[in-house]
Image: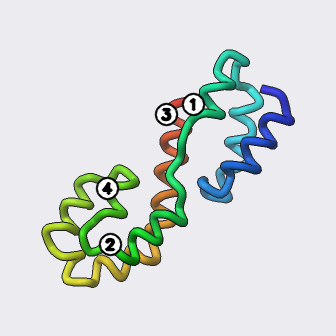
């Protein structure tokens, strides 16, 4: 993939990944075969802002964890009412980082 397309990818989707992983993502994209370019650009990632908003309003039901793919944790939050509110409160601070990590895992799995 050429450098302009890599920069476009980082500009449009870079906020969905942890900041420290951006150089690694750039390197992998630069070495990506040209036949995979469309798949990279079309892949959808979960928006961390969406997950924090969902966590504020529906976090006690585990919706935030279901959205990022942590089904087990989502069920745990659902059955315990967000850990009686404690787990919900902690997740308000952790869910954006968890979302970015899940997006990075998705990227590495698909194109690593």
Q: Quadrant of residue 5?
A: top right
Could you give the CA–CA distance between mark 4 and mark 1, rounded to whole angstroms?
24 Å
Whether residues under marks 4 and 1 lie with C-beta atoms below 8 angstroms apart, the answer is: no
Determine which of the numbered discs, if any, sits on residue 101 in the image.
none
> Is 14 situated left or right of 4 in this image?
left
Q: Which residue is mark 4?
A: 66
Could you give the CA–CA distance between mark 2 and mark 3, rounded to whole angstroms?
27 Å
Q: Which residue is mark 2?
A: 59
Could you give the CA–CA distance between mark 1 and mark 2, rounded to whole angstroms?
32 Å
Residue 36: percent from left, percent from top: 64, 21
Could you give the CA–CA distance between mark 3 and mark 1, rounded to whole angstroms?
6 Å
Camera-nearest label, 1 or 2: 2
Disc 3, SS: helix
Residue 60: percent from left, percent from top: 26, 75
Whether residues under marks 3 and 1 lie with C-beta atoms below 8 angstroms apart, the answer is: yes
Camera-nearest label, 2 or 3: 2
Disc 2 crowd rating (10 Å Cα; few below 14, some 14-19, many 20+) is: many
Ranked by sequence position, the earlier of labels 1 and 2 is 2
Determine which of the numbered discs, if any, sits on residue 112 in the image.
1
Direction right: furthest residue: 4
Disc 4, SS: helix
Write the residue at 49% across / 63% down. 50
Q: Choose between 101 and 42: the one closer to the eye.
A: 42
Q: Which residue is mark 3?
A: 109
């Amino acid at each position: 993939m050429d450098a302009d397309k890599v920069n476009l990818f980082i500009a449009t989707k870079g906020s969905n990944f942890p900041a420290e992983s951006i150089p690694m993502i750039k390197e992998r994209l630069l070495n990506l075969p040209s036949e995979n370019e469309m798949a990279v650009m079309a892949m959808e990632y979960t928006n961390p802002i969406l997950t924090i908003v969902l966590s504020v309003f529906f976090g006690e039901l585990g919706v935030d964890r279901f959205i990022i793919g942590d089904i087990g944790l989502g069920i745990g939050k659902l059955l315990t009412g967000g850990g009686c509110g404690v787990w919900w409160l902690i997740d308000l601070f952790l869910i954006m980082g968890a979302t970015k990590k899940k997006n990075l895992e998705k990227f590495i799995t698909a194109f690593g």
